[in-house]
Image (cartoon, rainbow, N blue to C red):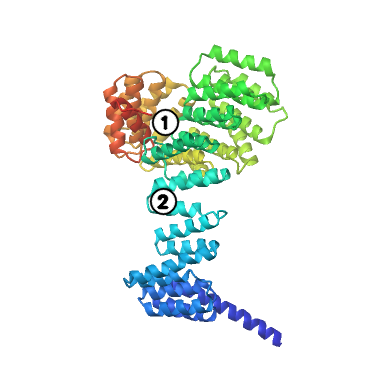
Amino acid sequence: MHKLLLILFCCFSLQFYAQEQQLALQYFRNGNYEKAASFYKVLHKKHPYNTSYTNYLIDCYQQLEKFEEVKIIVNNQLKKFPNQEYLYIKLGYNYQLQHLQEKATLNYQKALKAIEKKPSTGYLIGKTFQKSNLLNYALLSYKKAMKLNPSLNYYFQIAAIYGEKAEIENMFNTYLDLIANNNNYLPIAKNYIGKFITNDAHNKYNVLLKKIVLKRLQNNPKISWNKLLSWLFIQQKNYNKALIQEKALYKRNLGSLQNIIEIGKISFQNNSYETSIKCFNYVIEHTNDLEIELISKLYLLEIDIKTNTTIEIIETKFQQLFNQYGKNSETANIQVKYAEFLAFKKTEPEKAISILNEVLKLPINKFQKGKIKTTLADILVYTNKFNSALIYYTQVQNNLKNHPIGQAARFKIAQTSYFKGDFDWAQSQLKILKNSTSQLIANDALDLNLLITDNTVKDSLKIALKKYAIADLLSYQQKNQQAIDTLQVILENYKGHPIEDEALFKQAKLYEKLNEFEKAANNYLQIISLNKDDILVDDTVYFLAELYLNKLNNLEKAKEYYQKIIFEFPSSIYLVDARKKYRKLRGDLIN
């Protein structure tokens, strides 16, 4: 019985103690320092060794301007625990709040002096200075500790302080000192540096970082500086310069073909095909790995397809690959790409479906099967076999639920339902995808969901949206003229309807595919005149500028619309590209 009572008493005491802590912190955070101090005073008296309670009590008293109480607490604490030298900072700051700077400085110096006896206290002392916004003293603390004990690493703390002080050059140099000291910190340093640079090569911090790294490279050639330059160039989309750095590393047996492959993939995704070709040709010349060789050759083929190389040449290249490597599990990805080429470029969907069914019989993993079934379903949608397509998409989505392939299949289910005019089911799938792990899928889902939502509010029968979905399907099926004609019906019958700008934009992109550039430009101009605040306007302005520059050879108009992006749409995703192209047209020197 006595034991039970003791246990109950202990439990009650612990619960009461936890409540005291919680209440004290709550009052402190709410700015009720008088009540917080009353709790922390009790907690500090019970647990004088607990520095957290000491610090909170001091902070409460300073907020209440009870400076004498702070002085008493600190002096008593230092008598009991002489090793708590960080309290000299608290005492010094207490004097600073009373405008007694000489006494404040004297105590700050005592705290710094403590680092000489035990350099490892540099972290606590530096952190305490930081919390009181005494940044110069914090820097002195960290640097002094590291000088006395070189094994200590406070580079991150020092860099963070320089960032807080807006001394960006010092901050960059500190991160570079960290890398120079230990190459393993390069990935972490890049994450921190990446917060200060953009994809604009003319951004002042980008220019500054490049200058610092190049200087270090000249004074002390080091693999890390090449890697950092390569990374910077990739952020700036200067893929060719990044390739130069990686090739230099590879030639010195310090780099990896994998880095060059990554640059090839990134440049491919950003339509920088010239650099991508250089990357994959270089990889093919220097690899003995069959898998890497096939991946590189497949990318080169995809570039041919993207850049409208003649169908005959592409067909010949596919057949050369199959003659050289055969049709087996190693070439499964090439066979899938060939099926896509047959269906969407040569308009031979039945032959494509037959090839994919054969590939599915090969010994391949579940992820490859997921991709193949998705491609098979895409071709079935292309041939209007929606129900068969939905069966395949659903299989992939069920088998790879939390994988991007499965999420992509769910999006395709929604898209196919949208093509069929089943907007409610499409939206039910799209809402699930808004938290997709793939940002690209999440964005596509959001765009399609907005399209459906925006165009059903004023049209409960969804007649205009159904017509637009048909045009969208015709575009997907590459029946471009039929899609244009369908959109024209919408534009004639639904003037003032929310779908109007979408129809104009879609039609403009189709006109571009058919090389009818004047008609495309006219559509873009109509969108701009309809509603200057519309979500599509910055896209429209940018594409119009691109059209004037690349197809209509009107450099002045191109310059005008790039400038419009810069000054009227500063949050546009096209801002950096627009600024770069505007400067080039204006005659600025571009590095």
* Residue 514 in which image quadrant: top left
Q: Secondary structure at mark 2?
A: helix
Residue shown at the point (48%, 35%) measured from the top left: 217
Label placed on residue 163: 2
Label placed on residue 194: none
Left or right: residue 510 versus residue 85 is left
Residue shown at the point (39%, 36%) measured from the top left: 200
Q: Nearer the viewer, residue 467 or 272?
A: 272
The amino acid marked with disc number 1 is: Lys
Residue 288 can be seen, yes or no: yes
Left or right: residue 127 versus residue 562 is right
Task: Give the answer, above or below, for where 200 lies relative to 518.
Answer: below
Please tell me which of labels 2 and 1 falls first in the chain.
2
Q: Secondary structure at mark 1?
A: helix
Q: Nearer the viewer, residue 417 or 10?
A: 10
Which image quadrant: the N terminus?
bottom right
Disc 2 and disc 1 in contact, CB within 8 angstroms: no
Task: Give the answer, above or below, for where 111 lies relative to 139.
Answer: below
* Residue 548 in which image quadrant: top left
Q: Nearer the viewer, residue 90 or 485?
A: 90
Left or right: residue 158 versus residue 312 is left
Label placed on residue 467: 1
* Residue 142 % position (x, y): 48, 57
The amino acid marked with disc number 2 is: Gly
Q: Nearer the viewer, residue 555 or 535?
A: 555
Cα distance in 3D space between marks 2 and 1? 55 Å
Residue 436 can be seen, yes or no: no
* Residue 576 % position (x, y): 37, 35
* Residue 294 % position (x, y): 63, 24
